[in-house]
Image: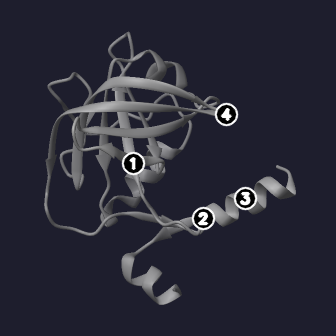
């Protein structure tokens, strides 16, 4: 990684983000999932969200070809789950409990929020693509602290306030 890319990445790390696990199903009916912090709301009317996916990701082709996906927003107590889905592996789903949403994709009911999405659009974005989803259904707990990522590591809301 060039020095300029590392410096750019470090600068971006000053923006605290939430952590998600994004899921879909393969054409063969196998669950696919990855940890991502590149999630954002786009529009309230219509309800649109987006996430960015690296072209080198193992699951790139699955998400590029899928018509539906689920965004699972993780709570502060789900760091282990985040780490599990951040690793490239073909057996991520061994011993993992999940529900299948109405759109056919896996969901973690213990997440802070779940957004069931239909693919709305895909945009080229350099070494990533931006996948925009139309939210078809959602649920949320209404309580609990989010799992955050800040300056290259997991963080808590109180910790970020202290680091200020």
Q: CB of mark 4 within 8 Å of CB of mark 1?
A: no
| SS of the residue under disc 3 | helix
As measured in the structure, the alpha-carbon distance from the residue carrying label 4 to the one carrying label 1 is: 18 Å
Task: Point out residue 97 in the picture as x, y percentages from the top left corner.
Answer: 24, 39
Task: Point out residue 21 in the picture as x, y percentages from the top left corner.
Answer: 38, 44
Q: From this view, report whether residue 3 is shown above or below residue 57.
A: below
Q: Kindly tell me whether residue 98 is visible in this rendering.
A: no
As measured in the structure, the alpha-carbon distance from the residue carrying label 2 to the one carrying label 1 is: 16 Å
Q: CB of mark 2 within 8 Å of CB of mark 1?
A: no
Mark 2 vs mark 4: which is more N-terminal? 2
Mark 1 vs mark 3: which is more N-terminal? 3
**For this view, does 78 lie left or right of residue 13?**
left
As measured in the structure, the alpha-carbon distance from the residue carrying label 1 to the one carrying label 3 is: 20 Å
Task: Point out residue 77 in the picture as x, y percentages from the top left corner.
Answer: 31, 64
Q: Kindly tell me whether residue 25 is visible in this rendering.
A: yes
As measured in the structure, the alpha-carbon distance from the residue carrying label 3 to the one carrying label 2 is: 9 Å
Q: Which residue is mark 2?
A: 13
Q: CB of mark 3 within 8 Å of CB of mark 2?
A: no
Residue at the far top in the pictured view:
28
- As rendered, which of 81 and 123 lies closer to the eye? 123
Residue 127 marker: 4
* Dot 1 alpha-carbon crowd within 10 angstroms: few under 14, some 14 to 19, many 20 or more: some
Mark 3 vs mark 2: which is more N-terminal? 3
Residue 8 marker: 3
| SS of the residue under disc 2 | loop
Mark 4 vs mark 1: which is more N-terminal? 1
């Amino acid at each position: 990684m060039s020095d300029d890319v590392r410096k750019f990445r470090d600068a971006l790390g000053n923006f605290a983000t939430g952590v998600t696990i994004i899921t879909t199903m393969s054409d063969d009916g196998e669950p696919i999932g990855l940890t991502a912090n590149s999630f954002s709301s786009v529009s309230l009317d219509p309800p649109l969200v987006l996430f960015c996916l690296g072209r080198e990701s193992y699951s790139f082709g699955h998400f590029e070809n899928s018509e539906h996906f689920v965004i699972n927003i993780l709570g502060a107590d789900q760091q282990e789950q985040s780490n599990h889905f951040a690793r490239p592996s073909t057996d991520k789903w061994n011993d993992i409990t999940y529900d299948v949403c109405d759109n056919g994709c896996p969901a973690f009911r213990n997440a802070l929020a779940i957004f069931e999405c239909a693919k709305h659009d895909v945009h080229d974005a350099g070494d990533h693509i931006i996948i925009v989803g139309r939210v078809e259904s959602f649920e949320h707990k209404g309580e609990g602290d989010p799992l955050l990522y800040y300056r290259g590591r997991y963080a808590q809301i109180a910790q970020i306030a202290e680091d200020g």
